[in-house]
Amino acid sequence: MPAETRTAVDKALDLVEAVARADRPPRLTDLAEEVGLHRATAYRVLVDLVRRGWVLRAGDRYLPGTAVLRLSSSAARNSLGALARPVLDRLSERTGMMVNLQVPEADRSRVIDVVRPDRLAMISRLMGEALPVHRFAGPLALVAALEPADRAPYLRTAEADGHPLDGPDGLLADVERTARTGFAVEYGRNEQPVASLGRAVVTRPGAPVCAVTLVGLGAEIDENRLGLLQELLREATDELGRILSGPGSPAPPSPSVAAPTASASPSIDAARAASGSPTAGDHPAGGRHATDPPESATATPSPSPGPEGAS
């Protein structure tokens, strides 16, 4: 960052961050060079940072101060991941499925926490990965909860990847369906036979904070279980919304205006058609397709190496 564009706060934060990420306690000259400040300027800022406890001086070297340590401890207790983890744990236990937490970024969503049952160890956790809207339920739920004018960067990412925007199988239809129902569902867009169901947590209209996604085998998110999974996911996201809003706050707005009834639920066939998976009408007469739900949707998946995951 050019020096002329930096405020005093920028300079202070640059130095705190440089101290925190250093492999070993740096000297003044090291810090000044790394952040692009004159040595005298860096020294003056460091004096104030030491006085306020953000940096600790030990001889001619600098370490993170007690204020940083207190902030880190507080963040560990009060971060989104820490607040959401009990909700994710309960949802995974109630559904038997993998659950992840995603936050919106500039043109994708990022997975910041995952609870994965041992039985689904063959599905990748995708922890820390940035996910595009046209391949995963989590970012689709987040984009659908945005104001229409704010969706463009996410749509451009899909378009650049060759995914159609228009038409019945296009991304805009997926977004509209998700905005109407409050739930995003995908089947095998990232990897067969993995499916996912996502819902955004919205504390004020048009500004989703995060999304919670259920991930499992497609046979487990079938016509018979979809309504139940939606209701459990709704309860979890509403609970997380209340936690983030704080005690005594009004109930956060729901991203869905429709109850999870058969008419309001995302169509299984529509989701499969959009993802390229076969619908009921595509199957040979009297036959079954590999992505069809089995006779019993409760079959335990094999622990053998499998798909890379969906979210």
Image (cartoon, rainbow, N blue to C red):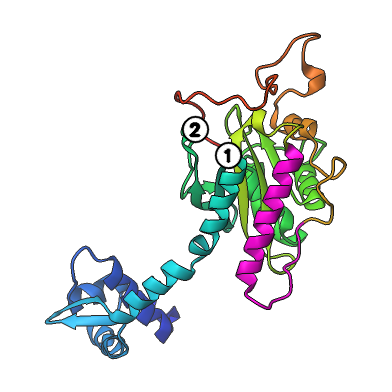
Amino acid of disc 2: Arg
For disc 1, the marked residue is 96
| Residue 108 point in image, percent of width and height | 58, 52
Answer yes or no: is residue 109 visible: no
| Residue 182 point in image, percent of width and height | 76, 52
Amino acid of disc 1: Gly
Q: Quadrant of the rendered structure where residue 95 is?
A: top right
Point out the image quarter for the N terminus: bottom left
| Residue 120 point in image, percent of width and height | 51, 34
Tell me the chief SS of the magenta region.
Answer: helix
Q: What segment carries the magenta color?
A: 226-255
SS category of the residue bearing label 1:
loop
Q: Quadrant of the rendered structure where residue 16 is?
A: bottom left
Count of numbered circles on the image: 2
| Residue 186 point in image, percent of width and height | 68, 37
Q: Nearer the viewer, residue 87 or 270?
A: 87
Would you say residue 239 sits in the magenta stretch?
yes
For disc 2, the marked residue is 119
